[in-house]
Image: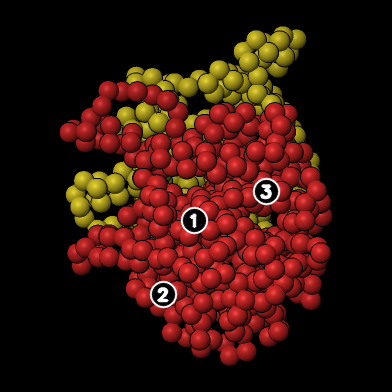
Amino acid sequence: MLKTDNINILKYEINSSQGDLKQTLKAIKNQDIKVSSKGISTDFGDATIPFYAFKDEIKQNQQSIKDALKDIVSKVISTLDTKQKKSTALIVGTSLIDWHLVDAINGCAYEYKKTNYTSKKYSIDSYAKELASEFGLNEFTMTINTACTSSANAMLEAKNLINCGVVDYAIVVGLEVFSPIMSSGFYAMELISQTDIKPFDTNRDGLILGEAIGAILLGKDNSKWSLEGGFSNCNSATITSVGADGKECVEVMQKALDDANITTDDITALKAHATGSNSNDLAEINAISKVFNPSITFTALKPFVGHTIGASGVLEIIIFISCIDDGFIPKTLSCHTPIVQDYMPINEHKKCNGGVFMCNYFGFGGNNISLIIKKENP
Amino acid sequence: MKLYIKDYSTYKSDEEDIDIKKTLKQKYKLDTRRQDAFIHLGLYGAMLLKEKTVIDKDDELYVTSGIGNVDVVQKTNTRVYEQNQPLKLFDFINLLGNTTSYYIASALGISGKNIFQISDNFTFINTLISLYASINHSQKNAILCSIDLASTPNEVIKRVLGVDEDCSVVSGVNYQKFSLTKDDAIAEIEFDTLSYSFDEINNILKDNNTKVIFSKRCDNFFETYPSYIINDAIKNDEDIIFVDSFEDRYKILKLKSLK
């Protein structure tokens, strides 16, 4: 494999259920986590599910979603000059339903909603294209949809594009906004917990979805944080989950280490995917136990912000590095009896100011990815 | 940027009208249950490619589409918002873009990288750029699947493709297997990230002697049409320059046959 330069993480911002980055960090430190609820339709009638919702609602329509994206993207490009912006790609990772398609369907498929024929090229990537145009960014935009790994995959794609010289910078956006369809789908798969997310706990009973937008600016300018490498694949036995022994996850983690030219001994801590679902957590902890010895420090962030599906790649990396910049690795909430006895996620915040970290995302549809990030110890 | 094409497969519905689901079941013995027409179209192209070429499990897979799986969005939208019915489980699963790429990877025997992505402008070329950047790092081969399904009513697709109301849209699925090395290649393709104005394009092409094909966003159109044009030129052993267009901007693909 050709080893190319690492890429630096230059700037970032989020909007999560706990607020902006500063507010989210404060909520994590103080364990003051807000979880609300949403109503959905199910086979058994209407149901209410817990949900990590934005403080200020982002409505399910093109304009609201675009406005929210614009707000976040404007913050991460604030230091770029005109020339740098022209060499900045915008890559979005999301599993969001395409409201451009829904609007086109509404405009012609149902008689009572019919509107006059209009034509303008739209797709799920239209948000990126329009923002690139408004901010004077490079024409290259892309929207990746690989479910829970969408924005994590977008980060690796961005790294390749920069290293290949296609662009000098890339903004990677993770986007997920509440959708009754997505929530109903997860509910139908019996993956939603009605209580709380209990990562790697024997009593775990599912995940709780959340919404978030996060954006990271990547480039070669100096920074304390870097994206050292990673590996992505798609090889699960079934479309909904990896095997219980976690062999698919083992392969991804080992090849991510290879890509970054490091070994497990170099890893300071691991941010697990840890959805709290029965099969996913079992596969991941079995994989962790095969790759790392029991002394590995690992944690889960979803109890703080929910499972934000396509946004989770970018969102959780931003939260993780912000916590370390603040001097700690956040503890895992609600894990009391670990699935594998010797592999217990940290149950207290742990002091940490730097090191090399693995971030896992093991998703629906067979897509798995591990990223390696690094911060030189101050 | 230059890539070599090792093999390809092509299907366009106005050239050959077949029952794809039946063909997948009877000829290729695939289990088509729980899947929809968009996935079937992708699988059909994959099987055509698999018949002709060796596919390694570590080949990277990129799947792209002009607008994605319209049928399943329409189906779920109607069911949930118009009929107030709960979502059907497999409609939810098929709604996710990487469901299609999962089934394609499984059919091809690929267990490595697998990305489903959409680019609003220059869908095919932008995915080609991503693919090039990726294998430039990994030094692997990669397969690009470009898939567009003309669904009913096709007015939905025409509204989001940005084409005239009387434009005819068709379905197409086109694959290429790309490599960084020339060994056993049947064609080479050159492209770059720049887009040009019409005047700039004319200036670039003024001394050109190679056959030039301009993108036509009408008449039997689908968004990943450049992928079909490339395959058609390879089939006919032609060297071509293809000029793709999007909102008054133009990009160039140069294809040279090596057969």
Q: Chain of mark 2?
A: A
Name the amino acid, label 2. Answer: Asp
Helix, strand or loop at label 2? It is loop
Q: Colour of chain A?
A: red
Q: Amino acid at mark 3?
A: Lys
Q: Which mark is residue A196?
A: 2
**x and y, in percent, of residue A339 in the image:** 53, 86
Please name the colour scheme applied to the rendered image: by chain
Give the Cα separation between the discs numbered 3 and 2.
32 Å
Mark 3 = which residue? Answer: A11
Q: Earlier in the sequence, mark 3 or mark 1?
A: 3
Chain ID of residue with mark 3: A
Chain B colour in the picture: yellow
Residue B207 visible in the current orientation: yes
Which label is found at residue B191?
none
Q: Nearer the viewer, mark 3 or mark 1?
A: 1
Q: Residue at x 65, y 71 (%)?
A: A329
Residue at image point 53% right, 58% down: A23
Which residue has dot 1 on it? A19
